[in-house]
Structures are given as structure tokens and as C-alpha cells.
Image: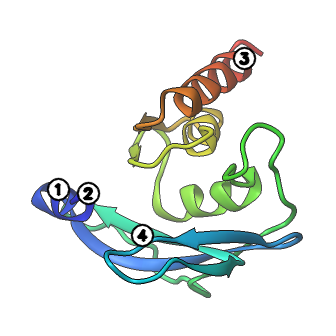
């Protein structure tokens, strides 16, 4: 549903692999009528959409972005700031807009603010949203 909604206003560019060093995460899957299964997650897909016209980078050396270290102090799905910074710098310039429709602990909005980008973050879980809001408000006061 979310992908279809995004495609109403944006075009798809590419899916990057956001690889996580360190401990793995066990993900439990419940899909339709299939029996529950488990997967050890070492990476996350990072889907890049854009509002036309595309101003893509001239050269991307890889669609594999590796985070230097795990950052899970605030939430188990928290992303590392260094990996997010690489992606933001690759696809945006200062004052441009970023949208993170699965904001989680707020790493994209936090880093976007630090890099002078505008950001819209969306999170359906109220507890997680409050973690992100507090994190962003605390960092922007510095």
C-alpha cells in the first residue's frame, strides 16, 4: 500500500542494500496463511524514490552501503547515522527535501537536519514516534 501511494507522486530510482555490521537480528515473518518463519536479518532494503526531474549522482560506486557500527541505544530498528549520512549526501543537496515514510527512531530526520536538509518523517507506532521526536528535539537544541 505504501509503495503504491509513493508511486502516485514519485518515481522509483533504485534499491540500495543497507548492510549492518555487528549482531544480527532475528525477524519473525507471518505472511498470509503460510506457517510462521524466521530470518536472520543482516541488511535492510533502502528504496530511493524521487520527484521528477531526477538529479541523480553522476556516479555511484555501489548500491551496497555499510554502516560502521550498530546504533541501537534508543530502538532495536535504529539506523546508524554514518550510513544514513552517506545516502543523504549522495542524493540531496542543502535545503532539499527528504521523506522517510518509516521513520522509526528518527535517524533520517536527525541527520537531514544536521546536513541542512528538510525532512518529513512518518511513523505509525506512537511510542517509536515519541522516541524519534524527543531524539530530534534534543539534538536540534545543541
Q: CA distance from mark 2 to mark 1?
A: 5 Å
Q: Residue at position x 84%, y 59% from top?
A: 70
Residue 78, relative to residue 17: is it above or below? above
Q: Residues within 10 Å of mark 4 (few under 14, many from 20)?
A: few
Residue 74, relative to residue 86: is it above or below? above
Dot 2 or dot 3, earlier in sequence: 2
Q: CA distance from mark 2 to mark 4?
A: 12 Å
Which residue in the structure is indicated by mark 3? 138
Instruction: Residue 49: give its label.
Output: none
Instruction: Residue 47: give its label.
Output: 4
Residue 36 placement (x, y as % from top left): 51, 77
Residue 61 placement (x, y as % from top left): 61, 87
Q: Residue at position x 70%, y 62% from top?
A: 83
Nearer the camera: disc 2 or disc 3: 2
Mark 2 near mark 1, Cβ–Cβ under 8 Å? yes
Nearer the camera: disc 1 or disc 3: 1
**Mark 1, secondary structure of its residue:** helix
Dot 4 or dot 1, earlier in sequence: 1
- Counting the numbered discs, the total is 4
Residue 80, relative to residue 113: is it above or below? below
Q: CA distance from mark 3 to mark 4?
A: 28 Å
Mark 1 near mark 3, Cβ–Cβ under 8 Å? no
Amino acid at each position: 500500500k505504501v509503495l503504491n501511494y509513493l508511486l502516485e507522486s514519485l518515481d522509483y530510482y533504485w534499491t540500495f542494500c543497507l548492510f549492518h555490521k555487528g549482531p544480527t537480528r532475528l525477524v519473525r515473518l507471518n505472511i498470509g496463511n503460510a506457517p510462521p518463519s524466521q530470518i536472520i536479518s543482516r541488511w535492510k532494503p533502502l528504496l530511493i524514490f524521487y520527484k521528477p526531474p531526477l538529479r541523480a549522482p553522476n556516479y555511484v560506486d555501489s548500491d551496497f552501503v555499510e554502516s560502521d557500527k550498530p546504533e541501537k541505544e534508543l530502538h532495536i530498528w535504529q539506523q546508524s547515522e554514518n550510513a544514513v549520512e552517506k545516502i543523504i549526501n549522495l542524493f540531496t543537496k542543502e535545503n532539499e527535501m527528504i521523506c522517510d515514510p518509516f521513520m522509526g527512531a528518527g535517524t533520517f530526520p536527525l541527520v537531514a537536519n544536521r546536513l541542512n536538509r528538510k525532512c518529513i518523517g512518518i511513523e505509525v507506532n506512537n511510542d517509536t514516534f515519541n522516541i524519534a521526536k524527543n531524539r530530534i528535539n534534543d539534538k536540534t537544541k545543541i
